[in-house]
Amino acid sequence: MDLKTWKKNGQYFTYKGEHPVFFQDEGNGEVLLLLHGFPTASWDWHKIWTPLRDRYRLIAADFIGFGYSAKPFAYAYSILDQADLIEALLQHLRIDTVHVLAHDYGDTVLQELLARTQDRKKKGAQGLKIESVVLLNGGLFPETHRPRPIQKALISPVGLLFTPFLNKQKLKKNFHEIFGEATPPSDQEIAEFYDLLSFDRGKYIFHKLIRYMQERKQYRERWVNALQTAEQPIRLINGGADPISGKHMVERYQELIPMADVVLFDDIGHYPQTEAPDRLLKHYLEFRD
């Protein structure tokens, strides 16, 4: 499947009465919700899409501000709002039970969704049920997150000034640094990633989207506790060569999470679903089976 076909096969729903949000809904069976990372989009899952679609009903949205979804400039982007968006989409589709596969930024959205399920359980309230979770490379703990220089620049008080310089060559340089040495992104993949992040002038809101790094510090206790006290089975599949959230993050995960279920790909970087789709698929299906 190419990017053009991906977009053609997608759908839109309206969030907050005015913002079109792009999503995919394909397959049958138990629902698998896929949550993508920063700065890309749901297209990240395309290499494992077909084999997963053969077993599950797949739901994957572009978060607001990402990919083919609306990118309003005057908007308060936050992890909490993205969790609201996902809940609104699932309500729109009349889905109340999901399994989750998340990556990077999507990991943090999942942590908030997981915390909400725990809040509802304490109150005896109804709502979204999460049956199982698989996490890929992400900033699960702010103390182990090692942002790239461009991320530090964007989150600075003058972050807006850096957005015009986020061109394809800069993206290629940064992605080659976070992928595994033997699994670099192809020029075609870089072009696809760039098309998605620059669609509808998306790069000019990156200084707003990047605020999630501050939220991870603000809500650390809530989001780490959601993992520590989760009753659902959780597996972490991680590219150890990732300089942002690689092996060093896995070590912290094993310190903090009881009975940690971890699969480590030592030679893979930040994007296991792109760099090693067959290996990821094997370990995901093993977890589910």
Image (spheres, rainbow, N blue to C red):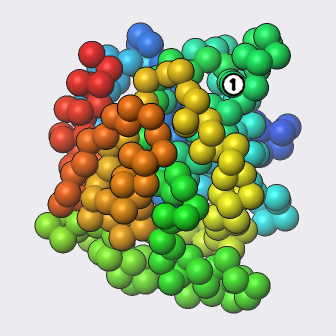
Please provide percent x and percent y for residue 167. Answer: 48, 82
Q: Residue at x 37, y 53 (%)?
A: 250
Please provide percent x and percent y for residue 122. Answer: 77, 18
Q: Which residue is mark 1?
A: 118
Q: Residue at x 61, y 84 (%)?
A: 153
Q: Residue at x 82, y 16 (%)?
A: 123
Q: Residues within 10 Å of mark 1 (few under 14, many from 20)?
A: some
Given the current orientation, which residue lies at the most extreme left position? 182
Q: Is residue 93 above or below residue 191?
A: above
Residue 73 seen: yes
Side of 256 where 271 appears, left or right: left
Amino acid of disc 1: Gln
Q: Nearer the viewer, residue 76 or 47?
A: 76
Q: Is residue 83 above or below residue 2?
A: above
Q: Nearer the viewer, residue 126 or 34?
A: 126
Please provide percent x and percent y for residue 141. Answer: 54, 56
SS for tag 1? helix
Side of 61 where 50 appears, left or right: left
Q: Residue at x 52, y 52 (%)?
A: 140
